Amino acid sequence: MAQINSHYLKLKAGYLFPEITRRVNAFCAANPEADVIRLGIGDVTEPLPAVCINAMKQAVDEMGVRETFRGYMDDSQGLATLREKIVEYDFKSRGCEIDPADVFVSDGSKCDTGNILDVLAGGDANTIAVADPVYPVYVDTNVMAGNTGDASEQNEYDGLIYLRANEENGFCPPVPTEKIDVIYLCSPNNPTGTVATKEYLKSWVDFAQEHRSLILFDAAYEAFITESHLPHSIYEIDGAKEVAIEYRSFSKNAGFTGTRCAYCVVPSELMGQDSAGNNVSIRDLWTRRHNTKFNGVSYIIQRGAEAVYSTTGQQQVRDLVSFYLENAQRISQGLQQVGVKVYGAVNSPYVWLKTPASQTSWEFFDYLLDQVHLVGTPGSGFGASGEGFFRLSAFNSRENIEAAVQRLQKLVS
Ligand SMILES: *Cc1c(COP(=O)(O)O)cnc(C)c1O
């Protein structure tokens, strides 16, 4: 009989989003007439930019003609034209020199952040740190890979280091005193909506240089940064190419959550260590993995992603992001008017609010759903330090956001 990967059995069954779905379905069954507005799961709602649609239609037509038909890509790392534009628009424009050979186009940052564990030693070989609260993918992929022990009552896994992000530290946990081999950073942050400053990122790059750690930097929400002093890429920090992989996605800026395209940068300067202590290029291992387990992103989709970097594409993406940011502002200001303490929203599509009247995150969830038929995400679902907080997403129509703000104000005031 086939033996299963028993590490999967350590995963908590009552995972956040299924539990939300369960409670919302139960509520809707009992209250079929209720007009429920969902500001829970972080999925975009607006259609794709027109430039992306046009580019993809054209690519489909190319596929229908012998002369321009494409089969397996020559280069599973991504179309050279796309990787050149990424390097120019996403990095050179910020003063970062990135080699297109270090850019790997993929079908999602979720997969990329999980798959990197393939080329790292498993078990307890690496000390791994995540923030608390955290994007659950970082934790669960480590559980699946066998890098943790069992979960505690508080849903924290033995063998993982949790860096507490709270109001006192501005949701940016300071570098620890102990040595860490692998650290996950996410900025702008999901769920707290806060952004790492240059000084903060420098403290991590310096730490990683000192301990020869690997930083996995998730910048999926980079396009939402509005304040000019904030870094968009970790490579804006000197020395980061020796210690960091950066993850970017077309999901949240261009609405590709259902279309699927992302990329990561694995710099050639980045080294890991083999068991004998020799330096090994992580990029070379990642290339080997990529070529064995992946045949590249659909040509049609890559052409759609490439269109994001045209002049019109840049404008259309800016408009899309501005639309969501305006939604976030309306939620944030509406809540502040009734005295609710809010974080995020300025450089992020997420509003991270402190639950009023000292309710727990789940108490506030039930209260919101019951009283005004709004769905959000309990902060405690992202980790123990999220208790007493609540995430509202700005990914919705303006009409729904306006209605949601009115309901929130009625509820809280
Ligand atoms: C949405 C999101 C991503 C993007 O994932 P894709 O697989 O590219 O859609 C990555 N990281 C975080 C923290 C996210 O919230």
Image (tube, rainbow, N blue to C red):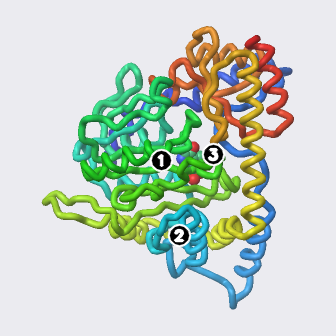
Q: Pick whichever of labels 1 and 3 is earlier in the sequence.
A: 1
Q: CA distance from mark 1 to mark 3?
A: 12 Å
The mark lying in front, picked from 2 and 1, is 1
Front residue of this view, candidates 150 and 264: 264
Residue 250 at x, y = what percent? 63, 57
Residue under the image location 50 percent in, 42 percent down? 196
Tell me which amino acid carries mark 2: Gly
- The C terminus lies in quadrant: top right
At a point 83% along the width and 30% down the height, the residue shown is 402
Badge 1: how crowded within 10 Å, few (<14), some, or many (20+)? Answer: some
Looking at the picture, how far across and down is residue 53, in whole percent? 78, 65
Label 2, label 1: how far apart the Cα atoms are: 33 Å
The vertical placement of 42 against 363, above or below, is below
Q: Which residue is mark 3?
A: 227
Q: Which residue is denoted by mark 2 in the rendering?
A: 296
User: Which numbered disc flags the more N-terminal residue, 2 or 3?
Assistant: 3
Q: Looking at mark 1, is its residue's CB closer than 8 Å to ligand 1? A: no
Seen at 56% across and 43% down, the residue is: 188
| Kind of residue sitting beneath label 1 | Lys
Label 2 lies in ligand 1 vicinity (Cβ under 8 Å): no
Q: Is residue 1 visible?
A: no
Q: Which residue is mark 1?
A: 198
The foreground one among 274 and 314 is 314
Image quadrant assignment for residue 354: top right
Hey, which quadrant is residue 26 in on the image? Answer: top right
